[in-house]
Structure formats: structure tokens, C-alpha cells
Image (spheres, rainbow, N blue to C red):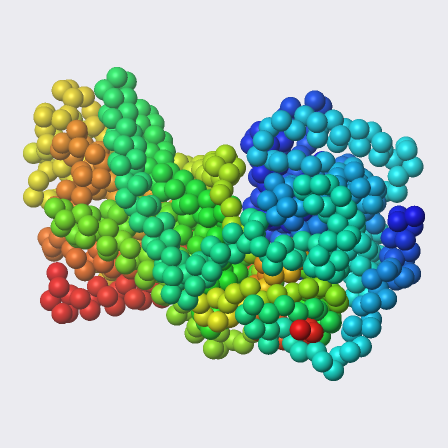
């Protein structure tokens, strides 16, 4: 069965109810996120439940609506369609129902939000509605569990009744095309005329239950059945309107908006940090413990440092992703994000974008991939592509470990709030840069199509925590599945590359002239004898003579102007595979796995090491203010995520945009970084 | 009886309210456009004047002849503005509101 209806009709809540929040999200190339399939639970029979992106008419107005239409007619052809109808918007929502009916779908109407209607003193006569629409009408409050089984039975009954054997007209693409071609303005007018009739006869006073025909003039006007509920005063919609007057107030509205954005981003830092530290410590503990228990060997090290260490890198920033997804899900369910979009429409239009770009750009701060998919709600192709183009500049969560590490290096330890402020500054910088790029492009290449906004503002309401939590969980799980796996593999691969060919050396080799025994010729030998090395055991000297090292030396002419030595260079290259891996690559390349202070966390050890490391030839320190700022700048601009390139190509419909992004951003990043580093040094900054 | 009336309404355009709608549309002289609707004012949609795809989309959303429409509030930057239509709030840019002819 498929759930179809407007985005704000309670459809997703119903979906969660029917599937028990157990579902998988399917991303067809180019599908927006919430296209989900779950198993019907507690329905009494086996059934697949499909949720669809919000739809107001079978004639799609944007790409995400097109996905729903495709799903209904081409890909999945549901046996039963449950049309979710908001009792407060009968005519508008029944419009879609009429269309579905005309095309022969086996329909059930799920009538939601009757409680809000009741607050206005009205109610829907479900029996009458069912009679007039010629299909079952099932009033339900999706936030409560009690009706799910009943709905299931109804669906089953309907399914059995609607089988092809019973003479029902089949639904197919051909009939859809005929329908779409025949849709005209007059037809729409007729539909609404009929629906106004329905509204008139079906809406009644909640108290006495009599039909409303003789009520105040307000109701007897067509289309006014729900529309004038506001004028009549009272009711949930007018309460929502009052709050809107604040949310969209010139002064208060903007202030609240900026505060909300600020709150989201700072919560990512402050709220997440204790959890992240905890996870970091846990992984450090686990790895050390593992090494203590198991015998010393290349394989064990590979598993401990490479695989588990790699997993640690991914898990450490999970709290941030969860917080951001949750915050956005919460705001979306409350209806606030639509207000946000309306608020920023004018400023965004000035730089070539659309108010509807707001949500995709905001999502970009979590991960660029779902953000690019979210851009499908923007009807105008130019604006959609422009949004996709600048999304990578919204610093995604993968950059956060990099920023955190590098900022910790250059900001004073005793004043952590400076680091926090700097981090916020970096995020803002990405935003400003994105706006600049957008403005520039919009001046050079003009938007030839028609730009439109037309956004429905759903009634503000308290979000259903269960739904938001479920969606957060699913988004995070999906992210971990896709990105996480790749990161673990890359970390593992990097570890292998830096530890092959394996070279054994004994613990007394520090004084020997054997090159295999020497690590970086730093002031402190990184492999102090006996204190750390197991007596009589072998240690694998990695890095210096590994394959990764050879690659690093090869690339040195490129990385040197940026202020990095070959080891930093290799770490940068790894950053191209996945940005977060840069941190674990740094740890590997600079050999902190046997650095002093095993009880300290990974980050602390790495920071200490970074302070020590010097260039092999000049003896100058590698990590200085200028070189670190350079790396930060590079990560801010460069496009280092190949999955993003692939999605950009799919969403924009060609290679041109994706290739331009890659070349422009990465090239500019390198040039600017070199300029920054050399410039700062010329000015005397170390 | 009601059911039959509905079906006829769909296929022949002879529904009860259809008689009213063309009459309203023909008094185009006193009409104005939605962007001129002042805060607190209520009007009735007469017709949509826009290119085909936009016109269809607006009408499907409920901007059909005879629909009551009210100006709810503006937004901080003055554009878009929020209107009440058929039980919901819809944000429209001035350029889009201009396409909708109304009678106050």
C-alpha cells in the first residue's frame, strides 16, 4: 500500500505508525530522501507500506513530486492507496483524491487532524464524505496507536475487493499520460466546484451535528468551508497564525531565525563535544587494550590501528551528525523550516537562488549528498543547479574533525571559547563564500527560466518526537552505511600502505646506522628503546620506507609550497578519499601510535607530535600558524569528496556542473592556500 | 441524487456553482490583482492570468474562480506575502500574486 498526500497532512506520522518506525529509505538515483518501504506491523497481514514525498496533484510541479508520480505509475503500482487528507483542507486535499480516483486507484481516505477542526467548532461527517467520494473514509489520529489494526483490516478488505479479477480498471502509464494531457484549467475548475459541494454537505457543527447549510454567510460561499475558519476566530490555525506574526515579524522574526541557526550550530559543538571525547577515549582504550591482550604482530596492529582505529574516526563525529539531523528534523516537523524559507526568499533571490534553497543549503552542513537530493524541491532548473553548485561550500560534518584538530593546534588551550568562536567563523566563512560564488555566477550566466516560490506554510505544531527520532536514526544509519564503510576501508588501506613493506627491527637499533631503524630525524627519536618496546620483540617501522612514503615524496613539490612535508602531503591525499581520514592519516604518518603517553587520547598525542615534527632537510617546524591556516583554508574550499561529484552529476543531469565544481573548487583552494602560506611567511608570520 | 449531480458536474460542467463562477469572471472591470490586497482584506479569486504551466499549478492549489482569499501577513523583507486560502496559508511572491485577479 502507498501513502499519498500533502507533505503536512500527517502522512509521515501515519507511516511511522504503520511500520513501527522500521523502514529502509530508498534513494533511487535522483529520489529525495523519504521514499521509504516498510513492513506493515500490527496490521494483521503481510503488506509493504510505501511512503512518498508530499504531493498536491498528479501533475507534478517539481522533481520530488515527479518521483511520487513515477512510483505510483511506473515503479511500484500500489495495490491500495491510502490518501491522507487533512480535515481542515478538504477541498484542496480531496482534489488529489479525485484525480487518483479518476485514474482507477483502489482508494481509502485517511482523515487526519480532525481534532484541530473540532477546535474550530466543526467536524466532518465521515459517512457522508464516504458516500460522496465513493470510497471508505477512515478518520485517524496517527499519533495514537489504537486505530492501526482497524485501518489494516480496511486496507485488506479493499485490496481483496479491488483485485483485477473483480473487474477493476488497471492503472498504467498510458492512462496516466492520457489523464495528464487532458488536464485543463476548466477541468480543475470543475473538480473544485464539485468539491465545494462536498465540503458544504460534509462539514457540520461539532456540537449539534446538523448540516451547515443555513449557517452564517461565511460558510455558504464556495470554498469557504475551511477557508474562513480564521475569520470566525478561535481554532488551531489562528493560533498558528498568531505565532507566525512573531516568526515572520520584520524584527523579531529575523532575530528568532538567526538565533535558531546559531543555536543549531553551537549545539553541534558544545553538545557534541563531551560525547565525541567519550567515544574517542573509548576507542583509544579499546585499541590499547586489544594490543595488550593479543600478541604483537603486523596483523594485530593492522586490525587494531587500521580497522578499529578507522572505525573510531567515523564514530567520533556521529554525535554531531545526530544532533544536526535531529535539529533539522524537529524544525521541519514543527513547520518552522517553511517559515525560514519564506524569510530568506528575497535575500536568496538577490544572489540567484530561491527561498527553497534554504533547506538544501542547511542540510549541506551535515552532508552534501542528501542536501543535493533535497534540492529537487526547487522547480526552476537554474536555481536548482546553482544551489547544488554551492552546497559543497557549506562545511559538511566531515570537515569538523579536521577543523577541530587544526584549530586546537593554533588556539590557546586554556581558552577553549576562542576555538569555538573560530569554528563558528569558519562555518560562516563557508556561507559567505557560497553567497559570493552564487552572486558571481548569477551575474555571468543568466537564469532563463521562470523562477517561482509558491510555498504552503503548514500549521505550526509540536513535533512528534517519535517520528523525528526515527527519521534521525534512519538518516544517521544511512550515512554510516555509505560513508562509514568507505572510511574504514580507506583507513585500513592507508595503514597497510604505510606499513608495507614491513620491516623488522630490534629494540636496540636506535643507535645503529641502519636506515630501517630511523624514523624522522627529529630531536627526539620517535621509538625510544626499551621503555615502550616489548623486550626482545620486533617492531615494524612504518612510514619512512613504505609505499605511502614513496608516494608522498613524489608529491612533495606540490605539497611543499603549502608548507607541508611529504607526510602531511600523504595525509592530504587521503583527505581526498574522505575528509575525516585526514586526521587518522596524520596520526599514522607522524607515528603517534607509539608516541609517549599512551594514556592520553589520540588527539592530544597527535597535537603534541605536530608541535615536534620538523622538515627533514631544513629542520624547520612543519606545523606553524601559516601552514595550519593554509590547510584549514584548503579544506574549506576544496572538493574532496568523490561521492559528492557523483551525486552532483546525477542531480544536475550531466558532467559539466560536477566537473566545474571539482576543478574550480580544488584548483582555487590550492592556489589560495599557497598564496596564504607564502604571503603570511613573507609578512613574517611563522 | 447528489451523486449524480456531482458526476454531471465533472463531465458537463453543469454543477450548481459553475453557474455562478462564469458570471463572476465576466465582471472583470471591478477586479484587481492579488498583490494589491491590503493586510486584513478579503477577496474572491476571479481568474489566474499566467503562462500555462504556472496557471494550472496555481489553480490546482486552489486559486480557482470563486475561492475566498485573505491577506494574512507579510514577511520581514516584504516579499513573499502570506495569504489564507481554503484552509491553509500560502506564501506567494508579489510577481506571482500579480497573476491572480481578484474581486474585493
| Position of residue A347 measured from the top left corner of the image (x, y, whole percent) | 45, 69
The quarter in which the N terminus of chain A is drawn is top right
**Residue A684 seen:** yes
Please say if B88 is above or below A444.
Answer: above
Quadrant in which the C terminus of chain A appears: bottom left
- The front one of A264 and A484 is A264
Q: Position of residue A215 (x, y in %)?
A: 73, 53
Tag count: 0
Where residue A537 appears, x then y in whole percent?
A: 18, 21
Left or right side of B24 for A339: left
- Left or right: A611 as drawn, with respect to A379: left
Q: Is residue B73 left or right of residue A294?
A: right
Above/below status of A49 relative to A640: above
Q: Is residue A66 visible?
A: no
Name the residue at 73% across, 71% down.
B46
Q: Does residue A452 appear to the left or right of A71 in the view shown?
A: left
**Residue appearing at x 79%, y 49% in the figure:** A201
Q: Measured along the vertical axis of the image, is residue A79 above or below residue A61?
A: above
- Determine the residue positioned at 68% across, 64% down: B68
Residue A250's quadrant in the figure?
A: bottom left
Q: Using the image, determine if residue A296 lies above or below residue A629.
A: above
* Residue B49 image point, x, y percent: 71, 75
Residue drawn where x is 82% and y is 73% of the image: B23
- Which of the two residues, A129 or A515, is positioned nearer the viewer here? A129
Amino acid at each position: 500500500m502507498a501513502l499519498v498526500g500533502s507533505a503536512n497532512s500527517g502522512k509521515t506520522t501515519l507511516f511511522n505508525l504503520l511500520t513501527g518506525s522500521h523502514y529502509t529509505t530508498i534513494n533511487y538515483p535522483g529520489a529525495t530522501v523519504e521514499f521509504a518501504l516498510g513492513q506493515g506491523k500490527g496490521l494483521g497481514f503481510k503488506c509493504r507500506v510505501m511512503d512518498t514525498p508530499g504531493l498536491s496533484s498528479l501533475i507534478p510541479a517539481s522533481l520530488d513530486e515527479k518521483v511520487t508520480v513515477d512510483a505510483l505509475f511506473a515503479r511500484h503500482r500500489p495495490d491500495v492507496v491510502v490518501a491522507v487528507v487533512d480535515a481542515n483542507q478538504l477541498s484542496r486535499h480531496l482534489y488529489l483524491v479525485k484525480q487518483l480516483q479518476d485514474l482507477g486507484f483502489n482508494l481509502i481516505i485517511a482523515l487526519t487532524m480532525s481534532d484541530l477542526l473540532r477546535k474550530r467548532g466543526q467536524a466532518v461527517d465521515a459517512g457522508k464524505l464516504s458516500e460522496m467520494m465513493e470510497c471508505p473514509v477512515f478518520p485517524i489520529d496517527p499519533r495514537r496507536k489504537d486505530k492501526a489494526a482497524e485501518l489494516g483490516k480496511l486496507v485488506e478488505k479493499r485490496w481483496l475487493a479491488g483485485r483485477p479479477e473483480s473487474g477493476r480498471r488497471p492503472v498504467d502509464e498510458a492512462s496516466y499520460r492520457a489523464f495528464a494531457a487532458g488536464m485543463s484549467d476548466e477541468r480543475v475548475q470543475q473538480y473544485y466546484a464539485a468539491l465545494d459541494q462536498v465540503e458544504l454537505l460534509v462539514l457540520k457543527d461539532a456540537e449539534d451535528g446538523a448540516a451547515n447549510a443555513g449557517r452564517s454567510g461565511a460558510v455558504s460561499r464556495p470554498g469557504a468551508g475551511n477557508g474562513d475558519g480564521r475569520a470566525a476566530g478561535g481554532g488551531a490555525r489562528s493560533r498558528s497564525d498568531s505565532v507566525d506574526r512573531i516568526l515572520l515579524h520584520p524584527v523579531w522574526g529575523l532575530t528568532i531565525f538567526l538565533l535558531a541557526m546559531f543555536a543549531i550550530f553551537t549545539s553541534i559543538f558544545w553538545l557534541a563535544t563531551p560525547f565525541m571525547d567519550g567515544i574517542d577515549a573509548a576507542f583509544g582504550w579499546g585499541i590499547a587494550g586489544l594490543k595488550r591482550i593479543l600478541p604483537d604482530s603486523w596483523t594485530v596492529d593492522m586490525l587494531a590501528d587500521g580497522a578499529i582505529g578507522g572505525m573510531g574516526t567515523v564514530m567520533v563525529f556521529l554525535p554531531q551528525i545526530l544532533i544536526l539531523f535531529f535539529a533539522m528534523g524537529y524544525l521541519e516537523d514543527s513547520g518552522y523550516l517553511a517559515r525560514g524559507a519564506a524569510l530568506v526568499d528575497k535575500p536568496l533571490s538577490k544572489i540567484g537562488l530561491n527561498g527553497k534553497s534554504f533547506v538544501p543549503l542547511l542540510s549541506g552542513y551535515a552532508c552534501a549528498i542528501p542536501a543535493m537530493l533535497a534540492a529537487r524541491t526547487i522547480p526552476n532548473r537554474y536555481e536548482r543547479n546553482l544551489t547544488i553548485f554551492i552546497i559543497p561550500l557549506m562545511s559538511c560534518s566531515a570537515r569538523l574533525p579536521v577543523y577541530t584538530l587544526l584549530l586546537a593546534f593554533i588556539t590557546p588551550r586554556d581558552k577553549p571559547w576562542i576555538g569555538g568562536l573560530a569554528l563558528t567563523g569558519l562555518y560562516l566563512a563557508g556561507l559567505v563564500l557560497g553567497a559570493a560564488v552564487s552572486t558571481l555566477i548569477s551575474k555571468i550566466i543568466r537564469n532563463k527560466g521562470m523562477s517561482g516560490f509558491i510555498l504552503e506554510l503548514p500549521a505550526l505544531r509540536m513535533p512528534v518526537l517519535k517520528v523525528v527520532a526515527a527519521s534521525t536514526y534512519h538518516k544517521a544509519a544511512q550515512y554510516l552505511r555509505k560513508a562509514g564503510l568507505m572510511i574504514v576501508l580507506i583507513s585500513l588501506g592507508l595503514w597497510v600502505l604505510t606499513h608495507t613493506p614491513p620491516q623488522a627491527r630490534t629494540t636496540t637499533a636506535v643507535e645503529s646506522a641502519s636506515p630501517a631503524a630511523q624514523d624522522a630525524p627529529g630531536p627526539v627519536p620517535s621509538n625510544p628503546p626499551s621503555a615502550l618496546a616489548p623486550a626482545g620483540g620486533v617492531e615494524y617501522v612504518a612510514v619512512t620506507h613504505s609505499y605511502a612514503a614513496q608516494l608522498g615524496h613524489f608529491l612533495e613539490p606540490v605539497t611543499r609550497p603549502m608548507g607541508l612535508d611529504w607526510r602531511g602531503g600523504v595525509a592530504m591525499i587521503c583527505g581526498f578519499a574522505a575528509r575525516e581520514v585526514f586526521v587518522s592519516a596524520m596520526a599514522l604518518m607522524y607515528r603517534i601510535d607509539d608516541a609517549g603517553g599512551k594514556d592520553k587520547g589520540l588527539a592530544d598525542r597527535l597535537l603534541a607530535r605536530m608541535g615536534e615534527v620538523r622538515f627533514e632537510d631544513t629542520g624547520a617546524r612543519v606545523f606553524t600558524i601559516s601552514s595550519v591556516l593554509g590547510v584549514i583554508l584548503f579544506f574549506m574550499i576544496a572538493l574532496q569528496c568523490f561521492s559528492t561529484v557523483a551525486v552532483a552529476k546525477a542531480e544536475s543531469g550531466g558532467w559539466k556542473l560536477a566537473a566545474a565544481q571539482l576543478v574550480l573548487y580544488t584548483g582555487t583552494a590550492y592556489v589560495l592556500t599557497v598564496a596564504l602560506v607564502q604571503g603570511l611567511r613573507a609578512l613574517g608570520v611563522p | 441524487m447528489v451523486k449524480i449531480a456531482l458526476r454531471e458536474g465533472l463531465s458537463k460542467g453543469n454543477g450548481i456553482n459553475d453557474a455562478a463562477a462564469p458570471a463572476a469572471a465576466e465582471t472583470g472591470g471591478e477586479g484587481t490583482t492579488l498583490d494589491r490586497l491590503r493586510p486584513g482584506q478579503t477577496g474572491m479569486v476571479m481568474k489566474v492570468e499566467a503562462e500555462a504551466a504556472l496557471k494550472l499549478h496555481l489553480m490546482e492549489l486552489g486559486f480557482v474562480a470563486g475561492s475566498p482569499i485573505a491577506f494574512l501577513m507579510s514577511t520581514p523583507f516584504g516579499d513573499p506575502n502570506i495569504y489564507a486560502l481554503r484552509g491553509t496559508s500560502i506564501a506567494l511572491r508579489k510577481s506571482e500574486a500579480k497573476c491572480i485577479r481578484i474581486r474585493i
